[in-house]
Image (cartoon, rainbow, N blue to C red):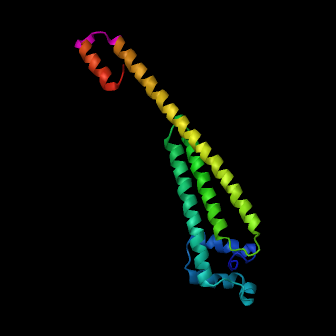
Amino acid sequence: MGRKSTISRLPQDVKSYIEGKLAEGRMTLDELIGDLGKRFPSQAQAGDLPSRAAVHRYGQKLERRLSAIRASTEAAKIIQAQAGDNNDARSEALTALIQTELFEAILDLQENDDPDMDPGERVGMLSTAAKNIATLTRSSVNLKQFQAKVEEDTRRKLLEEQRAKLDAMGNKGGVTEDTKKAIREALGIV
């Protein structure tokens, strides 16, 4: 494995500051490097501040993570706002968010270049992630089955209501038995 990144070796306050500025996106890399030198002069004098390239690489990783989280969060908000919960759409959105987080955690583990990490610990983390993914997949399958059942029950109820209305109609307004039969066939009412 490679060396730990320059930014991950920084004190937490410096790292948090860099992450905040990168997330804001208001500074160029050169402006951020200059700002770091002014804000953390002791780090700059010791030569402990990251290079422009290191900040760029870190920013790309951070942006990828933030984009995935933003997309999942937005999808969950839209589903929650637009969907009645007959099909348990909120659970579906929550499952999607959890899947995104697990994906991000696996990416973090793959990108972890910590030479001190024990290979057994890494295998343990992957094993835990695999178990969680299996549980999440079962949950997703159960949710899809539930949604299909709700859809089928709703359709059956609608057909029963339509059948009852057609039967109660009689021959009002010139509707003949042949017309009602054609309507039943078109709607799939037997």
Compared to residue 157, the image places residue 110 above or below, namely below
Q: Examine the image and state in which quarter residue 17 appears.
A: bottom right
Locate residue 166, reporting x and y percent. 34, 16
Residue found 35% across the figure and 12% down from its top: 167
- For residue 153: magenta? no
- For residue 170: magenta? yes
Locate residue 100, reporting x and y percent. 59, 56
Horizontal relation, residue 102 to residue 182: left or right? right
Which residues are the magenta region? 168-175
Total count of labels: 0
Horizontal relation, residue 142 to residue 48: left or right? left
Residue found 55% across the figure and 59% down from its top: 70
| Residue found farthest to the left | 174
Locate residue 99, reporting x and y percent. 60, 53
Locate residue 137, reporting x and y percent. 60, 47
Magenta highlight: main SS = helix
Q: Examine the image and state in which quarter residue 190 appears.
A: top left
Q: Is residue 18 or residue 105 the one in the foreground?
A: 105
Compared to residue 115, the image places residue 121 above or below, namely above
Compared to residue 78, the image places residue 18 above or below, namely below
Q: Is residue 7 or residue 145 the one in the foreground?
A: 145
Residue found 61% across the figure and 79% down from its top: 55
Any part of residue 66 in sight: yes
Residue found 57% across the figure and 42% down from its top: 141
